[in-house]
Image: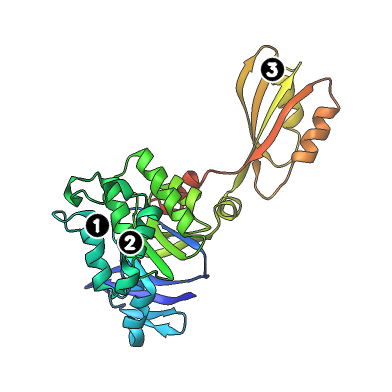
Amino acid sequence: MIQVERLTKYYKDLCAVDQINFGIQKGEILGLLGPNGAGKTTTLRMLTGFLQPTSGTIRVKHFTVEKDVLEIKKLLGYLPEEAPLYHDMLVFDYLNYVADIRAIEKNQKLARIRQLADLCGINEVMHQPIGELSKGYKQRVGLAHAMMSDPEILVLDEPTSGLDPNQIAEIRKIIKRIGKEKTIILSTHILSEAEATCDRIVIINQGKIVADGSSDSLKKSVSRSNLIDIVIQNADFQSVERELASLSGIEKIVRLDETDNQLHIRLTCRASADLRADIYRKIKQTEWILLDFHQTTQTLEAIFRELTKES
């Protein structure tokens, strides 16, 4: 549905976005993840036609930003980090005003406002001044504004920035609900938000894409090691360390805990080697009792730090 090719943006001598390429499928929730100043907002502003690229191509369906920017804007709903609201207006009056701007038919306007009030959870504040609302409610009103014309694509720039955990959970729930029907692109630097909300994550750093894929695929492809946790009964650490150290591919053996005759050990193994069967066979040859055995990869947080650290 959206195809970006060699997209580049310079601010004088500063390269904010450097020849990035990616595509977005219809119905996908894409998270644009990166540290502050990575180029996320600049990328979104070019996608929505608010900024002209220095070079490169953006295609939305069969339109291009160069020739058809107005047609593309008709397909988009955009919520910037700070929702552009009139604080002295009542929520209902504001949404009614937005509906007029978006040329919603008079006989459909009230039904559309009610539909968005239900979807965004703002029924109880419809007759309150926007300036008196919490930031969480202001974001919901901004979301209703962005969706007024029922766009096919929704672009959200840091939609949960500055919200408390409860507000973040509510906005995340709304985004997931909307994502069942629309293509959504959201930028964030909150890792848990991206992992919980997005079908796919693109990590951008210093204007370049450094990773692209689902949360699980990123963990598998970027991780250089696997962690295997085992809990064993009737064993001492020195014996376990001696037996398992003989297996090729185990890089480190660490004792995490030892209580009530139970030994909890973490093995760090090369990502290229799946040693679970070998470890199980080695334990089976002993008198030890295996109580727990599971493998994990690096967390998204660790991968993010590795990919975006200063060079």
Q: Which amino acid does label 3 sit on?
A: Gln
Marks 2/1: CA–CA distance: 8 Å
Q: Earlier in the sequence, mark 2 or mark 3?
A: 2
Tell me what residue is drawn at x 25 percent, y 67 percent. Answer: 98
What residue sits right under mark 2 in the picture? Answer: 113
On the rendered structure, is 149 left or right of 289? Answer: left
Q: Do the residues labelled 2 and 1 touch (CB within 8 Å)?
A: yes
Q: Is residue 53 above or below residue 219?
A: below
Mark 1 Cα shell of 10 Å, populated few (<14), some (14-19), many (≥20): many
What residue sits right under mark 3 in the picture? Answer: 262
Quadrant location, the C terminus: bottom left
Tell me what residue is drawn at x 84 percent, y 28 percent. Answer: 284
Q: Which of marks 3 and 1 is nearer the N terminus?
A: 1
Marks 2/3: CA–CA distance: 60 Å
Q: Which of marks 2 and 1 is nearer the N terminus?
A: 1
On the rendered structure, is 126 left or right of 186? Answer: left
Q: In the displayed image of the protein, which residue is found farthest to the front?
A: 107
What residue sits right under mark 1 in the picture? Answer: 92
Q: Which of marks 3 and 1 is in front?
A: 1
Mark 3 Cα shell of 10 Å, populated few (<14), some (14-19), many (≥20): some
- Among the 4 quarters of the image, the one containing residue 260: top right
Q: What residue type is labelled 1?
A: Phe
Circle 2 SS class: helix
Q: In the displayed image of the protein, which residue is found farthest to the right?
A: 285
Q: Nearer the viewer, mark 2 or mark 3?
A: 2
Q: Is residue 49 above or below residue 146?
A: below
Residue 81 screen position, x and y as percent: 28, 56
